[in-house]
Amino acid sequence: MALTAGSKAPDFISKDQDGKPVSLSEFKGKKLVLYFYPKDQTPGCTAEACNLRDNYKALQKQGYEILGVSSDDERSHQKFIAKEKLPFRLLADVDKSVHVKYGTWVEKSMYGRKYMGTARVTFIINEKGIIEEIIDKVDTKNHADQILKGSAASPKATSSDKPQTKKPAAKKSTAKKAKAVKPVAKKAGKKVRLKKK
């Protein structure tokens, strides 16, 4: 049965980068960002991890803890954490047991060749162990914004935690250009008529 928002998050026991056991139950009473990613030190996975790293304090301010999961081993995770200075733990789900519970070990296809691999999916789990949101279209360079947008309605959210946009400014400049173009077009039309006469 596929997991959906509102489902109880499956409990698990796995090991982190240091070989220490980690279970979902230890996050009871906390909000957890459980994100699955394909492979350490690849471009997309590095962009995603670094974006979460750079916004770690903002996420913690909203009550989130982060846990990354891939099928890489502990040594690979240690190198990844050291190189990118990641402040959160990574699960070495080598036997894919956590992947299977969350439905993230899937068939993929590249250049016509089919293979099994990790689906890039993030599960937002609340304090009671219920899945609040599933993000399956991850923007690796702006993933923290995707997560924080989900908590934007919370009274605890502040303007500094919300993603900033410059769309209003863009609309103003477009409107000014449109006003400037209209008079020129009318003048040009009059000149053409005079020449015909």
Image: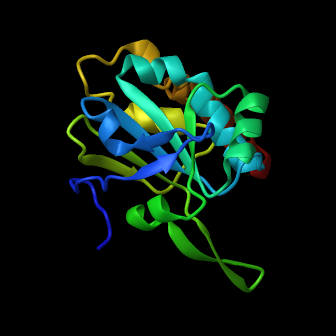
Identify the residue at image location x=60%, y=25%.
87
Is residue 67 in sight in this rendering? yes
Residue 172 percent coordinates (x, y): 53, 24
Q: For residue 108, what is the image quadrant?
A: bottom right
Q: For residue 30, what is the image quadrant?
A: top left
Could you say which is closer to the camera, residue 109 or residue 189? Answer: 109
Instruction: Tell whether 105 sits left or right of 41.
Output: left
Is residue 179 in sight in this rendering? no
Instruction: Tell whether 7 sits left or right of 100.
Output: left
Colour scheme in use = rainbow
Instruction: Tell whether 110 sits left or right of 23.
Output: right
Residue 69 percent coordinates (x, y): 55, 49
Identify the residue at image location x=56%, y=64%.
95
Identify the residue at image location x=62%, y=23%.
54
Could you say which is closer to the camera, residue 56 or residue 86? Answer: 86
Instruction: Tell whether 160 sits left or right of 166.
Output: left
* Up/down of 14 relative to 60, above or below: below
Identify the residue at image location x=40%, y=14%.
159
For the N terminus, the quadrant is bottom left
Residue 86 percent coordinates (x, y): 65, 28
